[in-house]
Amino acid sequence: MHLTGSRGECDCPACGTTSSRVHSRYSRTVRDLPIQGKRATLMIIARKYYCDEPSCSRRIFCERFPGVLESYARATARLDRVLMQLALMVSARLAARLSRLLGFAASASTLLRRGERFEPPILPAARIGVDDFAFRRGHHYGTIIIDLESHRPIEVLPNRDVATLRRYLANHPAVEVICRDRDARYAEAIAWEAPTATVVLDRWHLIRNLTDAVGRATARHHRRWTAALREYAERERKHAATGEDVGDAEDGAHEAEPAWLAAPAQEVSPREAERRKVTKQRRQDRYDRIAELAGKGIGKMEIARRLKLDRGTVASYLKQGGPPTNERRHFAPTLLDPFFPYLKTRFVDDGCRNAALLTREIKERGYTGSVRTVMRRIRTWKRVAPGGNDADGHVPAAPVRLPAPRTLAWQLLQHPDDHPAVELLKRIDEHAATLAELAPRGLHALRTKDLDAWIAWRRQVAASTCSDLKRYLRGLERDEAAVTNAITLPYSNGPTEGNVHRIKLIKRTMYGRASFQLLRKKILHHEA
């Protein structure tokens, strides 16, 4: 398209004087947005004017097209805006491929230059959220600051140092509310530069730290709790077999064994039994050779070299005084465990032997497993004795199954009364009972934002013997006011976390090779 300016006069860019005296004409080739997918090129005939102002330093100036075409530009302003938006939304190479498909082809270098021209606006905010994000996880971190009202990022800092955040807060004294996590560096910077601001600790981090404290407690006591449950189950089995009262000496007689403990013995096929027998004999022969050489005074390294074994294997055999067994040390809970009471009632009392029917019945009660699992369980019970039970009508029990520490911690926090394992553990262990009573209360107080319940829970923890929960509260003592604000105020660091996830996507689109300045502009580009 061949175009020319329609105005008969133009303002001098140096002094602003309007001139109509034409000096000459020249042509400009400019790219514009495509038309129907076709590349559009503008051939503009522009004028040069004389400046009639005697004091002006410019005697001749070129015709201007403000808002449409910048000086020396080879593309219209609207095409520049589109290229800039494209460069800031995706990677330069992907933007170059998209631009070719859209009809205004541009190279990756051109798009990078367009992106570098973007200047993020300075947006002051009275309520901000502060959080860190990883440039390279475990090595280098930055800081993102968002507006809690619009949920948009307003600044990105190159690190998470105290001095950097202090400079930002010093330049923005109007900040009234700051929502942050438990990072001590952010706390120190806020204490120095914004001592009057209302600090709100993120509730998600409070809940996460509470779950971590419960997880540490369950991990430390898990082995002891497992042993206590096994001892209890053994006493109950003896009681069921002999009819004698073998209750705990301290706690008195207990109720009969809970039905959730009733599980089938491990089912082993004849082929698997033969394979295990061969493996056991091979290990026994290996131990005999190791013991024979060790009895002659030969060292472990030499025994390992002669028998072509690892030194740790030799040391393990000699330490335990025999070959390892095939017995399982830990038993994971199954999907069928909560439905043992119903299955035992139907199998023993009602005489039902149809696995498919039993599966349909327990699926109506929430079972999500397969019919094969129920079938194996029923088949094992059938082999115990005619009628599916032993002489006393008791379905045999397997070793006690306690969930893994992480699962157990979650069960302690989430309605412990709904989990039979936790319910039994509360009856036989005082520490577990205290933890199961206190942990859900603290979680409920944080989730419901009940300050009175939180204060009462803190008193209960202080008077208890739960060292992990006490340590959790001691860590919150320096942020006591921020914790109170987190419970009573409506602010949260959730929008900040959402922007951190957005940063991860932006980093991946650039394959982690962008400079901090370009990354900052992409993050602060709100249209993305």
Image (spheres, rainbow, N blue to C red):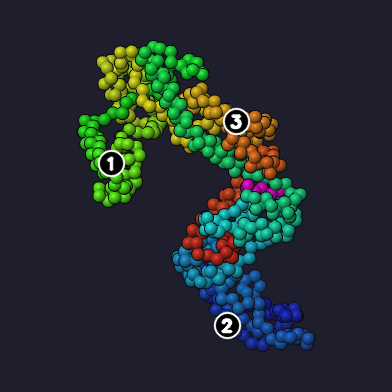
**Residue positioned 61% across, 59% down in the render:** 159
Label 2: state its secondary structure.
strand
- Where is residue 20 drawn, in percent x and y? 71, 83
- Where is residue 26 drawn, in percent x and y? 60, 84
Picture layout, residue 409 above or below residue 528? above
- The amino acid beneath tag 2 is Ser
Picture layout, residue 262 above or below residue 526? above
Label 1: state its secondary structure.
helix
Q: Which residues make up the magenta segment?
A: 175-182
Label 3 or label 1, whichever comes before in sequence order: 1
Q: How crowded is mark 1: few (under 14 residues within 10 Å), some or many (20 or more)?
A: few
Question: Magenta stretch: residue 176 in it?
Answer: yes
- Where is residue 288 drawn, in percent x and y? 25, 39
- The residue at which mark 1 appears reads as 295
Using the rendered view, name the quadrant where residue 275 is placed. Answer: top left
For the image, the number of numbered tags is 3
Label 3 or label 1, whichever lies nearer to me, is: 1
Say the numbered circle drawn on residue 26.
Answer: none
Label 1 or label 2, whichever lies nearer to me, is: 1
Residue in front for this viewpoint, 40 or 81: 81
Label 3 or label 2, whichever lies nearer to me, is: 3
- Where is residue 199 drawn, in percent x and y? 70, 46
CA separation in Å, label 1 and label 2: 102 Å
- The amino acid beneath tag 3 is Thr
Label 1 or label 2, whichever comes before in sequence order: 2
Left-right relation of 298 to 188: left
- The residue at which mark 2 appears reads as 27
Say the numbered circle drawn on residue 465.
Answer: 3
Q: Does the CB distance between marks 1 and 2 fall below 8 Å?
A: no
Q: How crowded is mark 2: few (under 14 residues within 10 Å), some or many (20 or more)?
A: some
Label 3 or label 2, whichever comes before in sequence order: 2
**Residue positioned 53% across, 65% down in the render:** 514
